[in-house]
């Protein structure tokens, strides 16, 4: 297995980073583009492997579509293929075949989709045969606490129904900003969707209109640079392409990192991160931004900050079981992550220094690699399978080297 040894840099970090484009925005915009015959021009599409996979499969005439390990791509394409009547088989990596899709498939079947599981019930691979469209408004109920991607997948195809869609979300709603991102992008191209109350979204029948859109830089990718500044003795990082008024829920990193020692100053073309003091106790509900949890957990652990976290339930069905992965790797720096009644408590080590020559397993998970990489500001470390960053941030190691962090590949 490939390894990347990351050498501890000088204590002061000063750099400017052109962040990757948001794959969340990119993938939604690509589905909307594919659902219309109008001309939609998209600028600054993500270089992430997930987005490249989405583009490739939307152009494909093959009967089978292999999404690899791209969960968003799998979920969005299941819905897209139903209204396109494309008759496609959707498959992926072994891990993808362990990631559930039953809630989305059940909802699509309820409104007329013909979908057949090819192996285990509730999981890919599956055969999407199409959908019987009726002249009545579609009504569907769906749990709101599992994955916002299920909800977004349904919302984007809703304008294709002759009388639209009423989607009722049951219980707690997780990652609400991602749902609002979907609605905002739909509105950008002429389709109106409204929250009728806290639990119901109504989409009227319409056609997506022509236009252009520039994808924002990725706030998830920004979070790792926040950790770097939080760990540095001194430093300043400028992140290009971020917007103060963002659709992305992971902009919550601005508020979170104020507690962990980073001030954000918005500028015309991005954000400037500046070192400041931090708290010693911290709590946060990650229901709306679960992709930040790993970054924040590692930052708190390394800075000796006691942290209480909620809203982590969806981490178990990501690229890996991220809760188990965090527990395993945080233990290497003497940190405990305990769980009780949907509440996680992070108890940092009492040791003043981190272990030397730390080796971190990434579990084939891009966010595990990038969440732990900033620890190099405090101690040299080795990461297993560093190429996993291709999934969302292909230039991460290049950007890190530009900031003065030396790396050495090992096999």
Image (tube, helix red, strand yellow):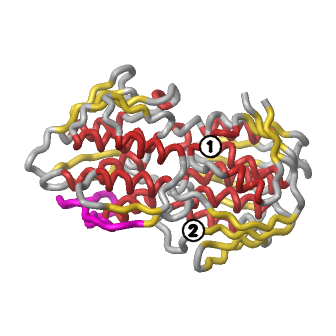
Res. 241 mark: 2
* Distance CA(mark 2)–CA(mark 1): 21 Å
Residue 69 vs 260, above or below: the answer is above
Quadrant in which the N terminus appears: top right
Res. 366 mark: 1
Res. 409 mark: none
Give the residue at x 13% y 53%. Answer: 162
Q: Say which of 4 and 205 sits in front.
A: 4
Decide if residue 144 is on the left or right side of residue 157: right
Give the residue at x 27% y 46%. Answer: 141
What element does badge 1 sit on?
A: helix
Decide if residue 191 is on the left or right side of residue 48: left
Give the residue at x 28% y 59%. Answer: 201
In terms of sequence position, does the residue under pointer 2 or pointer 1 come before the other? 2
Q: Which residues are magenta?
A: 189-213
Decide if residue 309 is on the left or right side of residue 408: left
Give the residue at x 62% y 39%. Answer: 365
């Amino acid at each position: 297995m490939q390894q990347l040894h990351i050498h501890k840099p000088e204590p002061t970090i000063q750099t400017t980073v052109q962040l990757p484009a948001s794959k969340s925005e990119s993938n939604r915009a690509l589905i909307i583009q594919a659902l219309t015959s109008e001309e939609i021009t998209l600028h600054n599409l993500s270089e992430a492997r997930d987005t490249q996979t989405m583009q490739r499969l939307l152009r494909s005439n093959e009967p089978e579509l292999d999404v690899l390990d791209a969960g968003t791509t799998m979920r969005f394409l299941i819905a897209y293929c139903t209204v396109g009547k494309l008759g496609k088989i959707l498959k992926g990596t072994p891990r993808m075949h362990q990631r559930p899709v039953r809630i989305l498939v059940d909802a699509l079947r309820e409104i007329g989709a013909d979908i057949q599981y090819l192996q285990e019930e509730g999981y890919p691979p599956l055969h999407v045969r199409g959908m019987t469209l009726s002249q009545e408004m579609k009504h569907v109920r769906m749990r709101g606490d599992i994955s916002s991607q299920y909800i977004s997948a349904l919302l984007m195809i809703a304008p294709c129904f002759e009388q639209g869609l009423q989607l009722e979300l049951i219980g707690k709603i997780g990652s609400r900003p991602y749902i609002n991102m979907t609605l905002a992008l739909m509105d950008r191209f002429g389709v109106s969707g409204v929250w009728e109350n806290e639990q119901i979204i109504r989409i009227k029948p319409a056609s997506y209109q022509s236009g252009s859109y520039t994808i924002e830089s990725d706030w998830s990718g920004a979070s790792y640079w926040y950790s770097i500044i939080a760990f540095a003795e001194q430093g300043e990082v400028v992140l290009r392409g971020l917007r103060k008024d963002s659709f992305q829920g992971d902009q919550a990193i601005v508020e979170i990192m104020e507690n962990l020692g980073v001030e954000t100053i918005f500028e015309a073309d991005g954000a400037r991160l500046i070192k400041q003091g931090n708290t010693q106790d911290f709590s946060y509900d990650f229901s709306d931004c679960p992709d930040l949890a790993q970054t924040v957990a590692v930052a708190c652990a390394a800075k000796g900050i006691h942290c209480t976290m909620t809203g982590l339930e969806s981490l178990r069905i990501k690229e890996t079981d991220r809760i188990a992965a965090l527990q395993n790797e945080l233990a290497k720096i003497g940190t405990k992550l305990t769980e009780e009644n949907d509440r996680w408590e992070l108890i940092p080590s009492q040791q003043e220094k981190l272990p030397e020559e730390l080796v971190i397993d990434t579990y084939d998970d891009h966010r595990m690699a990038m969440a732990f990489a900033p620890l190099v500001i405090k101690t040299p470390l080795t990461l297993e399978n560093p190429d996993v960053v291709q999934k969302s941030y292909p230039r991460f190691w290049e950007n890190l080297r530009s900031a003065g962090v030396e790396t050495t590949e090992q096999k």
